[in-house]
C-alpha cells in the first residue's frame, strides 16, 4: 500500500475528554475512545490512514487504523501537513539512524524501536550491512513495500530480512513468516559488541537473533568484575553475558539454557573470542536445584529469563516465578557475590523487582544490597509519554551471607 497525499483521508472523532493522553504525546488510541456514533470504526478500512480529531473536530494527529484491534489507531504524525507516506518515513528513519550513530556507534544496534521512533508497529535491528525487521501491525504490513524501499536506501545496507514470527502479530491476525527481501535468507547474524565477536541464529533465534537491549547492562557487569570470578549465566541463550564476563577476566562461566542449539552457539561464541564456557541444558529451575545439590558456588549470578508476565492477569504467577528463580540462584552464591537480576516483563512494575529480590534473598538465607540498576540500552530509547516503551529492568546487588 502507498498512501496518496492527494486522497482525502477518513476521520475519526474522539469522545469528549479522551484527547488528553494523545495531546500529551501518547501514540495509542483505543477503540472505546472513539465516538462511534459520529465516526463508526466500521467505516474505516483495516490498515487505512486517517485523521484523528477531538470532540470539537480539532485536528490531533494522523493515525494508522485497524478497526478490529483493541488499539484501533496508532499516531504517526501530529503535524497536519505531514501525513504518513514515503517522505515522512524516510525522515523518521534518518532521525533514528542519527540517534544510534551518536549514542550507540558502530553498525550493530536496534535501528528502529516502534513508537519511540515515530514508527509504531515496526522494529528493525542492524547487523552491519544486514537489517532484520519485525512488523507487528496490519497497517505497517500493508506498507511493507514502502518500508523495504526506504530501509534499503539507508547507507551501508545490503540485505533486509523480515522475521515476522513474534506473538504481537497474533493480536492483529497476521501470519508468521521469516523471509528475505530480494535475496537469500542468511542462516545467522553476526554481532560486534565491545570488541567481541558473536554469532546468533536468525530464523530459529530469539527476537531478531540478538538482545541489543542488554548492551549497556553487560558493559556495567564488565566494570564490576574482578579477575578470577566464577560466573553463572541463567537463561544464557547464545552466551552474551557469559562470554562478555570471560573476556573481562572471569575464571569460569556456566551457561544454563533449555535449548541445546543455543548452548552450542554459546560455546562457539566463546571459542570465537578465545575463551571457554561450560554448559548445562535443562529447565532453569531444575538445573539450579541440581547445582545446589552438587555444592556449586559462584561469584557472579546472572538471572536473565524470558518474560514471565506477558499479560496483566499473569502478574501473580509471574512474580512467583521471578522470586523462585532468583531464590534458587542465590542459594548458589558465594559470600560477597554479585547478583545481576533482569526482567523484560513490562507488566512487572520497576518498583516490584527489588521487593521480589529481597523476598528471594530471605528465603535463600542471605542479604542483598543494591549497588546499581540498569535498563534498556540507548538504542531502545524510552518515550516519556509512553511507559509501554520502558520494559527492561536490571538490578545489580551485593550478596552477603
Image (cartoon, helix red, strand yellow):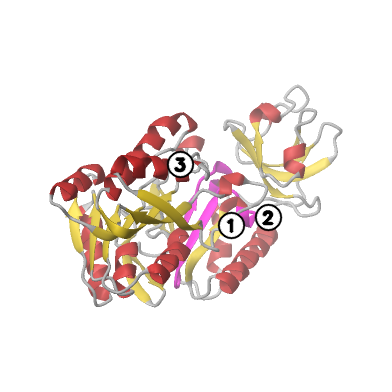
Distance of label 2 from label 1 (alpha carbons): 8 Å
Between 65 and 102, the one lying in front of the other is 102
Query: Which of the labelled discs sits on residue 24, or is there none?
Result: none
Instruction: Write down the residue under mark 1.
Output: 146
Q: Earlier in the sequence, mark 1 or mark 3?
A: 1
Residue 131 among those drawn in magenta: yes
Is the C-beta separation of discs 2 and 1 under 8 Å?
yes
Q: CA distance from mark 3 to mark 2?
A: 46 Å
**Left or right of 171: which side holds 264?**
left
Residue 362 falls in image quadrant: top left
Residue 128 within the magenta-colored segment of the rendering: yes
Residue 353 horizontal side relative to residue 363, left or right: right
State how far apart marks 1 and 3 are (Cα). Answer: 46 Å
User: Bounds of the magenta span?
Assistant: 116-141
Secondary structure under tag 1 reads: helix
Q: Categorize mark 2 by other alpha carbons within 10 Å: few (<14), some (14-19), many (20+).
A: some
Residue with the mark numbered 3: 355
Amino acid at each position: 500500500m502507498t498512501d496518496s497525499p492527494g486522497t482525502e483521508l477518513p476521520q475519526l472523532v474522539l469522545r469528549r475528554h479522551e484527547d488528553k493522553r494523545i495531546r500529551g504525546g501518547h501514540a495509542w488510541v483505543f477503540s472505546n475512545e472513539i465516538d462511534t456514533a459520529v465516526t463508526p470504526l466500521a467505516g474505516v478500512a483495516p490498515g487505512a490512514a486517517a485523521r484523528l480529531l477531538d470532540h470539537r473536530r480539532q485536528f490531533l494527529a494522523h493515525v494508522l487504523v485497524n478497526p478490529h484491534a483493541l488499539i484501533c489507531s496508532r499516531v504517526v504524525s501530529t503535524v497536519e501537513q505531514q501525513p504518513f507516506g514515503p517522505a515522512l518515513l524516510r525522515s523518521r528513519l534518518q532521525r533514528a539512524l542519527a540517534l544510534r550513530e551518536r549514542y550507540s556507534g558502530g553498525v550493530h544496534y536496534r535501528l528502529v524501536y516502534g513508537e519511540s521512533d515515530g514508527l509504531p508497529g515496526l522494529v528493525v535491528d542492524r547487523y552491519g550491512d544486514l537489517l532484520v525487521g519485525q512488523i507487528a501491525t496490519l497497517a505497517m504490513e500493508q506498507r511493507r513495500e514502502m518500508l523495504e524501499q526506504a530501509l534499503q536506501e539507508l547507507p551501508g545496507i545490503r540485505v533486509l530480512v523480515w522475521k515476522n514470527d513474534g506473538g504481537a502479530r497474533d493480536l492483529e491476525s497476521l501470519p508468521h513468516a521469516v523471509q528475505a527481501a530480494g535475496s537469500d535468507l542468511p542462516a545467522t547474524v553476526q554481532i560486534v559488541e565491545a570488541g567481541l565477536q558473536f554469532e546468533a541464529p536468525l530464523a530459529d533465534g530469539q527476537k531478531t537473533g540478538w538482545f541489543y537491549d542488554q548492551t549497556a547492562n553487560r558493559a556495567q557487569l564488565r566494570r564490576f568484575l574482578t579477575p578470577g570470578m566464577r560466573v553463572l549465566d541463567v537463561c544464557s541463550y547464545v552466551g552474551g553475558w557469559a562470554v562478555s564476563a570471560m573476556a573481562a577476566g572471569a575464571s569460569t562461566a556456566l551457561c544454563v539454557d533449555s535449548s541445546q542449539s543455543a548452548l552450542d552457539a554459546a560455546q562457539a561464541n566463546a571459542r570465537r573470542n578465545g575463551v571457554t564456557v561450560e554448559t548445562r541444558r535443562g529447565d532453569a529451575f531444575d538445573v539450579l536445584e541440581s547445582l545446589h545439590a552438587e555444592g556449586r558456588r559462584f561469584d557472579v549470578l546472572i538471572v536473565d529469563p524470558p518474560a514471565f508476565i506477558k499479560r496483566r492477569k499473569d502478574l501473580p504467577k509471574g512474580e512467583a516465578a521471578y522470586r523462585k528463580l532468583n531464590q534458587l540462584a542465590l542459594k548458589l552464591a558465594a559470600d560477597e557475590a554479585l547478583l545481576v537480576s533482569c526482567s523484560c516483563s513490562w507488566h512487572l512494575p520497576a518498583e516490584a523487582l527489588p521487593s521480589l529480590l529481597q523476598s528471594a534473598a530471605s528465603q535463600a538465607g542471605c542479604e542483598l544490597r543494591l549497588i546499581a540498576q540498569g535498563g534498556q540500552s540507548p538504542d531502545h530509547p524510552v518515550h516519556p509519554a509512553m511507559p509501554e516503551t520502558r520494559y527492561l529492568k536490571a538490578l545489580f546487588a551485593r550478596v552477603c551471607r
